[in-house]
Amino acid sequence: MGDVYKGVKAGLEDAIAGRYTVYKEEPVDLKVLRQQLSMTQEQFAQRFGIPLASLRNWEQNHRLPSGPIRSYLRVIEKNPKAVLKALMSA
C-alpha cells in the first residue's frame, strides 16, 4: 500500500506543479476508413457489429464514439482483416 500511496502522491504533486502531459487521441475518420475497405455504411456496421445509426452519427460528426468503441475503431483501422477474422471465428 505504501508504493501505491507514493505513486498517487507523486502524480498529484506533478499535476499541481504543472508537470504532466496530455495525450490527445486523433479520431478515426470512419468515412475514409469505410471507403478504403470498399464498404457501404450498412456493410461496415453489420460486419463490425456497430449499430448503423451510431455509425451515421459518427460519420456526420453529430456524436463522437466513446472510449472503448474509439479503441475498437482504431484496431479496425490498423488491421481490419484481423478483426474480421476474429469476428468470423467467434
Image (cartoon, helix red, strand yellow):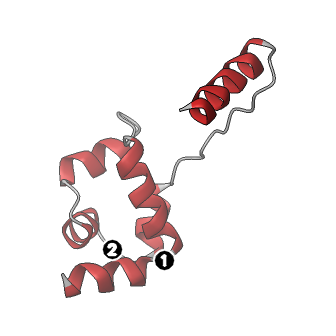
Q: Residue furthest top?
A: 16
Residue in view at x 20 percent, y 47 percent: 53
Residue assigned mark 2? 39
Q: Is residue 50 left or right of residue 38?
A: left
Residue in view at x 21 percent, y 85 percent: 88
Question: Within 10 angstroms of label 1, few (less than 14), some, or many (20 or more) residues?
Answer: few
Helix, strand or loop at label 2? It is: loop
Badge number at residue 5:
none
Whether residue 11 is situated above or below residue 80 in the rendered picture? above
Which image quadrant is residue 67 in? Answer: top left
Whether residue 68 is situated above or below residue 17 in the rendered picture? below
Q: What's under tag 1, amino acid-wise?
A: Asn
Q: Residue furthest front?
A: 2
Q: Quadrant of the C terminus?
A: bottom left
Is residue 3 visible to us here?
Answer: yes
Nearer to me, 64 or 68: 68
Badge number at residue 79:
1
Q: Earlier in the sequence, mark 1 or mark 2?
A: 2
Nearer to me, 1 or 56: 1
Is residue 59 visible to us here?
Answer: no
Whether residue 26 is situated above or below residue 11 in the rendered picture? below
Give how far apart the Cα atoms at labels 1 and 2 are.
15 Å
Q: Is residue 28 left or right of residue 7?
A: left
Question: Within 10 angstroms of label 2, few (less than 14), some, or many (20 or more) residues?
Answer: some
Nearer to me, 47 or 66: 66
Residue in view at x 24 percent, y 78 percent: 87
Q: What's under tag 2, amino acid-wise?
A: Met
Helix, strand or loop at label 1? It is: loop
- How far across and down, in percent of the image, does residue 30 sit? 43, 57
Residue in view at x 27 percent, y 62 percent: 41
- How far across and down, in percent of the image, does residue 76 sit? 43, 69
Whether residue 33 is situated above or below residue 19 in the rendered picture? below
